[in-house]
Image (spheres, rainbow, N blue to C red):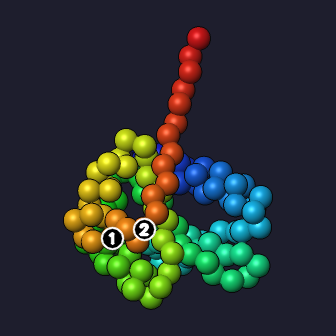
């Protein structure tokens, strides 16, 4: 069973809560990637792509490049363990200085 969809929904919920505190909202896109449009007072201020389970391919990288060339801000959300790998890919593609990277991690503490 793939946990990709529920995990992505959980992350979107958490991100939406944080952004609502600074008067920003998320709008899902019909044809990802990226997954979300970040809006503030009805104006698009950037895009967010949530990566789960090795979703990096040339098509996705080309979409990122097109967004950046159009002058858009892009934030990529990856698991904490994947940050180094994604950073290396972005440097290789010449995008590291133009894309922000956010991370998530899931901690489980048992007695």
* Circle 1 SS class: loop
Residue 107 horizontal/vertical position (percent): 53, 31
Residue that mark 1 sits on: 95
Q: Residue furthest left?
A: 92
* Residue 49 on image: x %, y %: 47, 65
Residue 96 vs residue 4, the one in the foreground: 96
Residue in view at x 43 percent, y 81 percent:
67
Q: Would you say residue 63 is visible in this rendering?
A: no
Instruction: Estimate how packed mark 2 is, as few (under 14), some (14 to 19) or many (20 or more) residues with alpha carbons within 10 Å.
Output: some
Screen quadrant of the N terminus = top left
Q: Quadrant of the C terminus?
A: top right
Q: Is residue 109 left or right of residue 95?
A: right
Say whether residue 74 is visible. Answer: yes
Q: Residues within 10 Å of mark 1 (few under 14, many from 20)?
A: some
Q: Give the spatial CA distance, label 2 vs label 1.
A: 6 Å
Q: Which residue is nearer to you in this view: 63 or 4?
A: 63
The image quadrant that residue 109 belongs to is top right
- Residue that lies at the very extreme toward the bottom in this rendered image: 70
**Is residue 81 placed above or below 51 in the rendered structure?**
above
Q: Nearer the viewer, residue 62 or 88?
A: 88
Are the residues at dot 2 and dot 1 in contact (C-beta closer than 8 Å)?
Answer: yes
Q: Residue at x 51, y 75 (%)?
A: 73
- Which mark is on residue 99? 2
């Amino acid at each position: 069973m793939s946990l990709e969809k529920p995990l992505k929904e959980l992350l979107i919920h958490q991100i939406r809560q944080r952004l609502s505190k600074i008067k920003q909202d998320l709008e899902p896109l019909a044809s990802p990637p990226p997954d979300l449009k970040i809006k503030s007072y009805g104006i698009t201020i950037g895009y967010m792509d949530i990566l789960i389970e090795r979703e990096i391919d040339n098509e996705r990288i080309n979409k990122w490049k097109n967004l950046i060339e159009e002058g858009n801000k892009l934030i990529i959300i990856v698991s904490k363990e994947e940050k180094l790998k994604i950073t290396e890919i972005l440097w290789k593609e010449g995008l590291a200085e133009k894309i922000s990277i956010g991370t998530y991690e899931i901690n489980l503490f048992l007695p």
